[in-house]
Amino acid sequence: MSPIDEIQSLLASNQLRHLTPTRLGQAVVRDVFVNDDVFNLLDENGTLESRFERVAGRARSKIDAFISGSTVTFALDPHEKNRTSFLARNAPIAMGIVDVRITDPKPMIRIFGGFAAKNALVLLSWAPRDGLEFQKEVIQCRAKWNKLFNNKAPLIGTTHDEYLSGNFDIG
Amino acid sequence: MMSTSQGISILAEPQGTAQISQRSLGYVAEAARDAMFDVVVRACIESGVSKATLAKRLKKDPAQVSRLLGAPGNWTIDTCAELLFAIDGSMLSVDRFWPMQEAKSNMRSPACFADYSSSSATWSEIPAHIIVNTSVYAPAVAAGSSVTEVEKWKY
């Protein structure tokens, strides 16, 4: 099965959900698919510790903007990136895991996942930035990915254009 | 059947004295901050003014201007207004809209299902030397164990 076929199958079995922008007037230009954990973070009816409610709303706003094709900053180098990048690859790059970075104001969080194909981001876990152990999160996210996609690797590109079309800043 | 999020309620109009959720407040605040940021960044690009020039006009450290123009972060309305004026002499104009009254876009289904380049994508080959061990603090592999080792990544 192609990555897109796999995603269709996962949507049909409710293992993934497709996020649509909260504003009805916004179109889907880039796809974001989430599992229940991330959906719980991003959805109005999700259950969260109260200290994360506001940042969850902020995260949803930024992800909606990403979905509707806004300009985003995407860092390919895990070790040299703009601290304000919206999206960044994690080390080791060969794992294929990226994170969505919700930064200042605090609390900050990171949402981890991978690209199944160009413009098709799958988000599978999240954690508060405070005390985050990146290596552990990357490995755990990749394990979730492997289980969902039968050990097939996320997209690992060499240029930004291989991950995203449209507007992006190199960061 | 495709599973999609509803996501309508986070922007539902406030009713009576019911408390608005922190999610909703976080959402609208972030959207406003990003909208202000977009206006400023676009003005910056269109005017061609350099960060160094902006720094001098605002009597700020160039590194501080760089940080401000990197992301809206902790921007205040003062920040936005001052940057905009320093860029090209313009002032911020504010308006409002009701998101739930917007006409619904026709393009709400997964774009990748319609896009040829995505639909024809194939899975990457996992390089033979890369094997994922889901145990973070894996002990040394015992003889006869079925656990595979994490090898050194190369990229």
Image: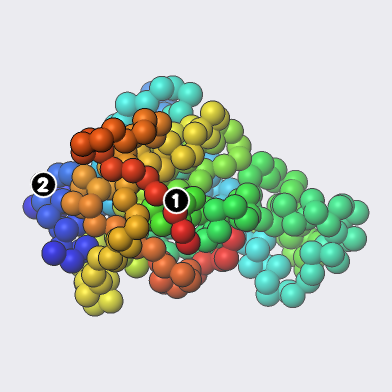
Query: Is B87 on the left or on the right of B103, as rendered?
Result: right
State the image coordinates of residue A63 (x, y, percent, origin top left). Answer: 42, 51
Q: Could you tell whether A79 is left or right of A66 in the image?
A: right
Q: Quadrant of the C terminus of chain A?
A: bottom right
Image quarter of residue B58 = bottom right
Q: Is residue B60 left or right of residue B98?
A: right
Q: Is residue A49 above or below residue A12?
A: above
Residue A64 visible, this angle: no
Q: Amino acid at mark 1?
A: Lys
Q: Which residue is mark 2?
A: A13
For this orientation, the residue located farthest to the front is: B143
Classify B42 as above or below A15.
Answer: below
**Which image quadrant for residue B13?**
top left
Could you tell me residue A130's position as x and y percent?
A: 55, 30
Residue plotted at (19% across, 57% down): A7
Along the line of sight, which residue is nearer the eye, B107 or B89?
B107
Q: Position of residue A37 (x, y in %)?
A: 30, 35
Q: Which residue is denoted by mark 1 in the rendering? A: B152
Name the residue at 12% across, 55% down: A9
